[in-house]
Image (cartoon, rainbow, N blue to C red):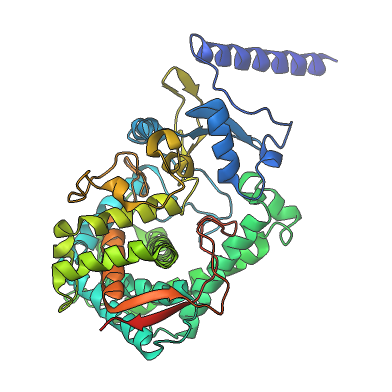
């Protein structure tokens, strides 16, 4: 009886302390609005097949900031670009959610995308420095992109007048090669079976999880009791297979490593590991090698899938709206005379092209719910209290389609990024395709260069239209996935001269 009394005293004391703490936290602060949910599952049952569409509805109902409950996980959705900027430049909101079992190493949160704290900060600086040294944003990188582009053009010329296969698949392999030559000094054949399997299986595994509601992202213990039904089993098997492939690449580099001949990013990273003797350093020992594997996996997938998806949407839009395609080609001809390839150096003289690319990024909004952040500590934000470990979800799709900001967001209109006379490109603060703040995408420069060079040089050479014998894809319909991909479509390439 005595021990039971102590237990009750302990429980009541903890309860009172918790209540008073929460009350103190909220004193003088507004309650964050949001939809009502159910016990245990929160608002999950209300999300539907496409979470971003429900988030858009709630943004209209509750405003620029509201809370949702994803099972037991508290999240705050931000639908205002200025709020996103203010929040994402704040260290208190620079963490990453912990998605148990989703990382390439199931037991560790590594890489550049999902890591946080010192591990992330040190590796981000290292990655940016080394990639710049290997040519990012320089003519060396442009030459690598153009080399791959020439291969794509040759493939299109060989099949001129005939329906293409998967546009995204063709573009994915070229984008991967441009990046991979810097990362691992390696180039793949466009029909490489291992590469095709890697790209297709990963996309399918992620899509499978989202088609099943993405529940294991919010209820991680489901992976233990229903691994197949939740999509986790297939996803984990694919990730493990990918990890082994990346580990083999690193092992091969270790065998052929020469200190006086650092060939690529992997060699430079291994050199850093070899010279590190401080056991507290993030570059020390076997864990550092796991971090290398996770980082190159991030570069492989995050750095290529997003770019090829953006290019696929761009081709779709230009086929759907021929007058935009014609105006785009006219600017290319004016700048180059159609007698040479388009170069990154031409960018300042091509305002319509820059506006077109921004409109593709806005209209497609391929990462509709953004890449989530996590509050690393309890913090007040604009009169609201954001508890520690709250997820911060930037509602990218809504911000890019808000009629109060864009006027006619459902119209594909590059002119919205041009001056009134159409001669000057205008960058918009409301376009956050690569997010903003301390965790802004490290590959934005490469992605923009790649999209610019691919689009301009392909459409310089070809008029492109949908295959009349195949279904014409929608400008908006997609399959549920982390990335919004266009429906599969086939096109006909016709040489312009």
Residue 170: which quarter of the image? bottom left
Which of 233 and 416 lies nearest the eye of the viewer?
416
| Residue 62 rendering spot, x and y as whole percentages | 55, 26
Q: Quadrant of the N terminus?
A: top right
Q: Is residue 166 above or below residue 307?
A: below
Q: Is residue 369 visible?
A: yes
Residue shown at 46% from the left, 79% from the top: 195
Is 147 situated left or right of 336 in this image? Answer: right
| Residue 246 rendering spot, x and y as whole percentages | 44, 72
The residue most toward the bottom is: 158
Q: Is residue 42 above or below residue 151?
A: above
Q: Quadrant of the C terminus?
A: bottom left
Which of 160 and 13 lies nearest the eye of the viewer?
160
| Residue 49 rendering spot, x and y as whole percentages | 65, 50
Which of 149 and 69 lies nearest the eye of the viewer?
149
The residue most toward the right is: 1
Is 206 situated left or right of 428 in this image? Answer: right
Residue shown at 39% from the left, 49% from the top: 362
| Residue 141 rendering spot, x and y as whole percentages | 21, 69
Residue shown at 55% from the left, 48% from the top: 99
Tell how many labels.
0
Q: Is residue 309 above or below residue 467?
A: above
Which of 428 and 74 lies nearest the eye of the viewer?
428
Is 40 situated left or right of 182 in this image? Answer: right
């Amino acid at each position: 009886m005595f021990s039971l009394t102590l237990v009750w005293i302990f429980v009541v004391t903890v309860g009172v302390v918790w209540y008073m703490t929460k009350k103190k936290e909220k004193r003088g602060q507004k309650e964050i609005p949001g939809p009502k949910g159910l016990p245990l599952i929160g608002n999950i049952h209300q999300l539907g097949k496409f979470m971003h569409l429900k988030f858009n509805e709630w943004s209209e109902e509750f405003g620029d900031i509201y809370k949702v409950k994803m099972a037991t996980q508290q999240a705050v959705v931000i639908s205002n670009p200025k709020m996103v900027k203010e929040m994402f430049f704040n260290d208190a909101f620079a963490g990453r959610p912990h998605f148990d079992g989703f990382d390439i190493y199931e037991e560790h949160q590594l890489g550049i995308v999902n890591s946080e704290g010192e591990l992330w900060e040190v590796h981000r600086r290292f990655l940016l420095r080394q990639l710049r040294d290997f040519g990012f944003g320089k003519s060396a990188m442009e030459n690598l992109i153009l080399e791959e582009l020439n291969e794509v053009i040759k493939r299109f010329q060989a099949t001129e007048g005939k329906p293409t296969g998967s546009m995204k698949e063709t573009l994915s392999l070229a984008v991967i090669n441009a990046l991979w030559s810097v990362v691992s000094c390696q180039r793949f054949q466009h029909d490489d079976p291992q590469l095709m399997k890697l790209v297709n299986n990963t996309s399918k595994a992620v899509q499978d999880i989202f088609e099943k509601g993405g529940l294991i992202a919010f209820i991680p213990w489901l992976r233990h009791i229903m691994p197949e039904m939740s999509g986790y089993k297939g996803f984990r098997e694919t990730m493990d297979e990918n990890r082994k492939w990346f580990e083999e690449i690193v092992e091969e580099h270790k065998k052929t490593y020469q200190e006086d001949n650092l060939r690529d990013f992997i060699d430079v990273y291994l050199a850093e590991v070899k010279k590190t003797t401080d056991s507290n350093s993030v570059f020390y020992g076997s864990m550092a090698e796991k971090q290398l594997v996770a980082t190159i996996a991030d570069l492989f997938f995050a750095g290529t899938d997003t770019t090829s998806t953006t290019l696929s949407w761009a081709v779709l839009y230009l086929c759907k709206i021929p007058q935009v395609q014609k105006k785009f080609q006219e600017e290319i001809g004016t700048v180059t005379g159609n007698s040479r390839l388009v170069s990154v150096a031409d960018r300042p003289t091509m305002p319509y092209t820059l506006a077109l690319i921004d409109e593709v990024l806005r209209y497609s909004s391929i990462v509709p719910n953004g890449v989530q952040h996590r509050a690393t500590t309890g913090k007040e934000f604009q009169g609201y209290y954001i508890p520690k470990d709250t997820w911060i979800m930037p509602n990218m799709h809504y911000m890019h389609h808000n009629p109060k900001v864009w006027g006619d967001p459902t119209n594909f209109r590059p002119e919205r990024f041009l001056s009134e006379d159409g001669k000057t490109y205008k960058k918009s603060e409301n376009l956050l395709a690569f997010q903003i703040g301390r965790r802004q995408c490290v590959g934005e420069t490469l992605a923009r260069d790649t999209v610019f060079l691919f689009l301009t040089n392909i459409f310089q050479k070809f008029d492109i239209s949908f295959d009349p014998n195949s279904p014409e894809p929608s400008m908006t319909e997609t399959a549920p996935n982390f990335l919004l991909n266009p429906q599969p479509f086939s096109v006909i390439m016709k040489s312009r001269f």
